[in-house]
DNA sequence: TGAGCTATCTTGCATTACAATATACTCAGC
DNA sequence: GCTGAGTATATTGTAATGCAAGATAGCTCA
């Protein structure tokens, strides 16, 4: 299981990524995150996050009726959101490289001693 | 630059990893993190983190004199700390795989056909 | 009527990176 | 001796964010 602290900062970018694939809504996003292996991301996490992203201009929302339940709030990326996704991916790679370098050093031989 | 929120949870495991390579102290750890590409991790981050890890039994500390400044507090991993490092690595891989899977999907093929 | 699934939102809490600040030791230059 | 720079540790308070818990509401089916 992924500890909640480790999701901080990463989750936001991943939600942007999911929306960039296709317009979608909170409930489905939480199910997709689970399918990708992030574990159960609860509503108390997902909805505040979406509202935050809408408020700062990364997302644009439209309500649409559903045949199987209450109205859904569909989100789409704005240009700001696309830029944020790009930034996220860049930062994530930076972190990933740093961690990877460190883990290589403790596994194999020590490289610089 | 890696945003601070994205470091949460990850930094702790990385500090354990650095100490597992060799007993070391706070000031040097912050320099090593910088060398690995994590950016500047300030004292206000590193010392509380080390005290937390010492308090919950992951680290054991011993003071040693230095020839060039005040006493250094050297940290070493306890068995608990080694287990925590293993856990961290496992969780990190889980997150990494999830993010990677997602990023592949938005780049190449669409999954919604 | 009520159970169960779908769907959104809010409140309050815990964790943690970080800025700012305080303390203290060693050494070089004056 | 005094002062400032570099080394080294610690504390306080703040901001960000994942999440539990709970409220609200609509749909379907028995």
Image: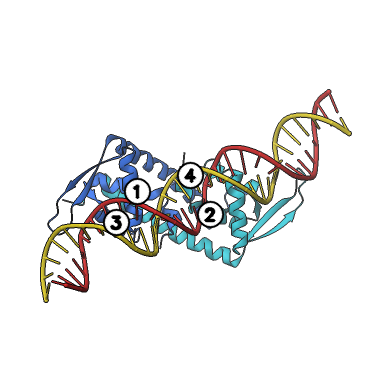
Chain colours: A blue, B cyan, C red, D yellow
Q: Which residue carries the number 4 mark?
A: B4
Q: Which residue carries the number 1 mark?
A: A49
Q: Are marks 3 and 1 in contact (CB under 8 Å)?
A: no
Neighbour class for label 2 at 10 Å: few (<14), some, many (≥20)? some
Host chain of mark 2: B
Q: Residue at x 27, y 49 (%)?
A: A18
- Cα–Cα span, label 4 and label 1: 17 Å
Q: Is residue A101 left or right of residue C3?
A: right
- Cα–Cα span, label 2 and label 4: 13 Å
Q: Position of residue A61 (x, y in %)?
A: 23, 43
Host chain of mark 4: B
| Nearer to me, A67 or D22 | D22
Of tags 2 and 1, which is closer to the observer?
1
Q: Secondary structure at mark 2?
A: helix
- Cα–Cα span, label 3 and label 2: 27 Å
Q: Position of residue A83 (x, y in %)?
A: 33, 36
- Cα–Cα span, label 3 and label 4: 24 Å
- Cα–Cα span, label 2 and label 1: 24 Å
Residue D27: quadrant of the picture: bottom left
Residues behind callouts 2 and 4 on a single chain: yes
Asked if one can make out residue A108 in the rendered structure from this viewpoint, the answer is no
Q: Are marks 4 and 1 in contact (CB under 8 Å)?
A: no
Host chain of mark 1: A
Q: Position of residue B95 (x, y in %)?
A: 39, 56
Neighbour class for label 3 at 10 Å: few (<14), some, many (≥20)? many
Q: Which residue carries the number 2 mark?
A: B12
Q: Which residue carries the number 3 mark?
A: A30
- Cα–Cα span, label 3 and label 1: 11 Å
| Nearer to me, C22 or A59 | C22
């Amino acid at each position: 299981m992924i500890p909640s602290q480790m999701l901080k900062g990463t989750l936001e970018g991943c939600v942007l990524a999911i929306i960039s694939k296709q317009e979608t809504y909170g409930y489905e996003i939480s199910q997709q995150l689970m399918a990708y292996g992030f574990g159960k991301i609860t509503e108390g996490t997902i909805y505040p996050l979406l509202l935050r992203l809408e408020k700062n201009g990364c997302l644009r929302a439209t309500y649409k009726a559903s045949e199987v339940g209450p109205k859904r709030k569909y989100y789409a990326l704005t240009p700001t959101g696309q830029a944020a996704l790009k930034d996220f991916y860049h930062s994530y790679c930076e972190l990933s490289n740093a961690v990877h370098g460190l883990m290589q050093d403790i596994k194999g031989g020590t490289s610089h001693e």
